[in-house]
Image (cartoon, grey):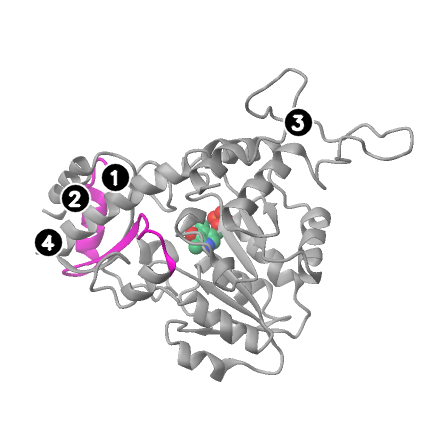
Amino acid sequence: MKPETTAIHASNLVKAVTGDVTSPIHLSTTYFRGEDGGYPGGHMYSRVSNPNRSALEKVITELEGGADTCAFSSGNTAGMAIFQALKPGSHIIAPDDMYWGFKKQLLTIFADTLSFDFVDLTEVDNVENYIKANTVLLWVETPSNPLLKICDIEVLGKIAKKHELIFAVDSTFASPILQNPIALGADIVMHSTTKYIGGHSDVLGGSLTFAAKNEFFDKIKNIQETGGAVPSPFDCFLLLRSIKTLAYRIKGHCENAEKLANYLNEHSKVEAVYYPGLPSHPQHEIVKKQMKGFGGMLSILTKGDADFARKVVNSVKVFSQATSLGGVESLIEHRASVEGPTSKTPQNLIRISVGLEHIDDLIADLEQALG
Ligand SMILES: *Cc1c(COP(=O)(O)O)cnc(C)c1O
């Protein structure tokens, strides 16, 4: 089935006696045992599994073309499960512009147990220079945040395979609609389901989808079940509801973002636009090869200093000045001040999550904010 159909039907696991067309929310934390001591309903205790989470894991698995998925209570806990599953002393290669929450995990929580290099993964010829005897994981994020850099998943996958590294892709900015890294060689696809999959800025979550149910999958499953950083049944219900419209929301995000990028690209107060859909984007050819659309995220460099960039984000009326992305409402932020004093993000950079409002209203709002 095509993703539009999968998104609507793959999660309907419940054949309730009441004949529900959509799945109810299962709040029970515990389940009846059968006379033989087994669990005839397929669930024992809701930290281990519950019907809403199983449905969520199933639909994400199908959309990504994987073997199985583990859902977590946030994107950060999904990523952290991978770092927790590595043997102490392991070395990781990660992008130089890795999502700052993950970089912070490595630098603070895992500083004593793991080692890592943050590398520009768009320069694929350079990557092998960083592989050491104890390197076990190649972590990729594409499109990246906030510069929308694109990594060649297929080429990096071959490098990972040659050196027997676990190859994980943070595909949050793409969503399962625009990019399926497993088909391009990834072992694991990570999503912050908080973003496009949730899509309404009202639920936090994360997921890891595996190409194979191997030994590493078992380790992650154990961290999920025993660590217990799982989404609640209500979180899963919200995500399942959102996934049904994911393909159509993504279509709208892409259309609006492409128009906004073209508008900003011509604007006299804008020095640069970072959007994978612009022919001037340095990895535009890779984008066309591995993505089905250009996404809803873009960043701009305003002409002038940080003060002008801050003035722009303070002058918007339709956009909301807030962090995060992937919701129906357009968000705008001065990224360097979100990331703090150690941020390497340019001071004149503004990041935009293009929502589903009418494009004319979005353009008019930026027109008045840029002055
Ligand atoms: C938001 C985000 C995360 C972290 O997810 P949370 O749900 O906020 O914990 C990881 N990677 C990327 C690319 C993100 O945008």
Alpha carbons under labels 2 and 1: distance apart: 9 Å
Q: Is residue 123 left or right of residue 180?
A: left
Q: Is residue 317 above or below residue 304?
A: above
Asked if the residue at label 4 sits under 8 Å from ligand 1, the reply is no
What residue type is disc 1 on? Phe
Give the structural element (helix, strand or loop) at label 1: loop
Q: Earlier in the sequence, mark 3 or mark 4?
A: 3
Alpha carbons under labels 1 and 3: distance apart: 36 Å
Residue 144 can be seen, yes or no: no
Q: Which mark is residue 27?
A: 3
Q: Which residue is mark 4?
A: 267
Asked whether disc 4 touches disc 2, contact meaning CB atoms under 8 Å apart, the reply is no
Residue pictured at 57% horizontal, 82% vertical:
132
Q: Is residue 363 above or below residue 112?
A: above
Alpha carbons under labels 3 and 4: distance apart: 52 Å
Asked whether disc 4 touches disc 1, contact meaning CB atoms under 8 Å apart, the reply is no
Disc 4 crowd rating (10 Å Cα; few below 14, some 14-19, many 20+) is: some
Q: Earlier in the sequence, mark 3 or mark 2?
A: 3
Alpha carbons under labels 4 and 1: distance apart: 18 Å
What residue type is disc 2 on? Leu
Q: Which residue is mark 2?
A: 366
What residue type is disc 4 on? His
* Nearest-to-viewer mark from 4 and 1: 4
Q: Is residue 109 above or below residue 71?
A: below
Residue pictured at 55% horizontal, 56% vertical:
79
Q: Which residue is mark 1?
A: 319
